[in-house]
Image (cartoon, grey):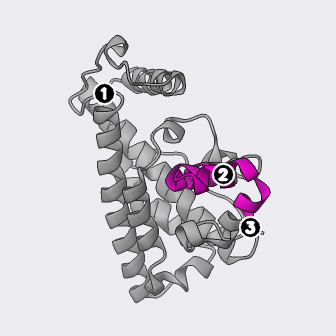
Amino acid sequence: MDSAQSRSLRKMVTRCREILEKSVFELLEGKYGIHRGGTVEDAGRLIYLTDEDRRGREEIVASLGHLKSFGLDARAAVERLVREVAFTHLNRLCALKMIEQRGLIREAVGRGHDSRGFKYYLAEHPEEEAAWLAGEQDLVYRRFLQSSAGALEEEIGSLFSRNDPARTLFPPPRALKEVLEQINDPDLNEVWRQDETIGWVYQLELPRFGGHRQALVFRLQ
């Protein structure tokens, strides 16, 4: 990777991290009643949450408890959770971009809603196509991305695990669109063809975790 490509990648990672962290904080506070300062509202007050939302919120609260068991205070635990979730989403989307570039999966993120793999998904899932036609485009695309990630869980479980807060704290449509625009920047076309790129993304994010995080390693075959 030359210096120009490295700068483009660093710029993308920095901007995507900002977008994702902001959106996760907004989801936590606006929907799940978990505030930046560490305050967790009583679940009974959140009468608008669905049963699925409540289960997801319970997992988030449990994750915060786990982080606090390592000595973090409430505020620091929320901040760490936000960084973890943003990190997870960025790495998943980058990995999908790299995998589709190699023809190992149908295009999933290269053109957002217009991606070829998503069109096949709609054709193969009539109920999802009906939801799409009924105006639920963003929700259906989210389920498609989660389905694509789930299909890779066995091969790349550490990156595509279904059992983490990132599944509940999925980027809202505007944030996802902005992140995909960054990832699909033409300046990065050659970068995604290089096997070491996902490692560089990981290394650029690692300082945010004080250097303590499990290494992200997988092979593109």
Residue drawn at the location 60% of the way across and 56% of the way down: 133
The answer to whether residue 73 shows anywhere in this view is: no
| Cβ atoms at labels 2 and 3 below 8 Å apart | no
Amino acid at dot 2: Ala
Give yes or no for contact between labels 1 and 3 (Cβ–Cβ under 8 Å).
no
Q: Are marks 2 and 1 in contact (CB under 8 Å)?
A: no
Residue at 33% across, 48% down = 23
Q: In the rendered view, tell whether residue 205 sits above or below residue 143.
A: below
Tag 2, which secondary structure? Answer: helix
Task: State how many labels appear.
Answer: 3
CA distance for labels 2 and 1: 34 Å
Give the magenta range.
120-146
First-in-chain label (2 vs 1): 1
Packing grade of label 1 (10 A; few <14, some 14-19, many >=20) is many
- Residue assigned mark 1: 34
Foreground tag (2 vs 3): 2
Q: Secondary structure at mark 3?
A: loop
- 73 magenta-colored: no
The disc labelled 3 sits on which kind of residue? Ile
Q: Position of residue 122 (x, y in %)?
A: 70, 59
Q: Quadrant of residue 212?
A: top left
Q: In this figure, which residue is indicated by the disc labeled 2?
A: 130
Q: Quadrant of residue 35?
A: top left
- Mark 2 is surrounded, within 10 Å at the Cα level, by few (under 14), some (14 to 19) or many (20 or more) other residues, namely some
Q: CA distance from mark 1 to mark 3?
A: 36 Å
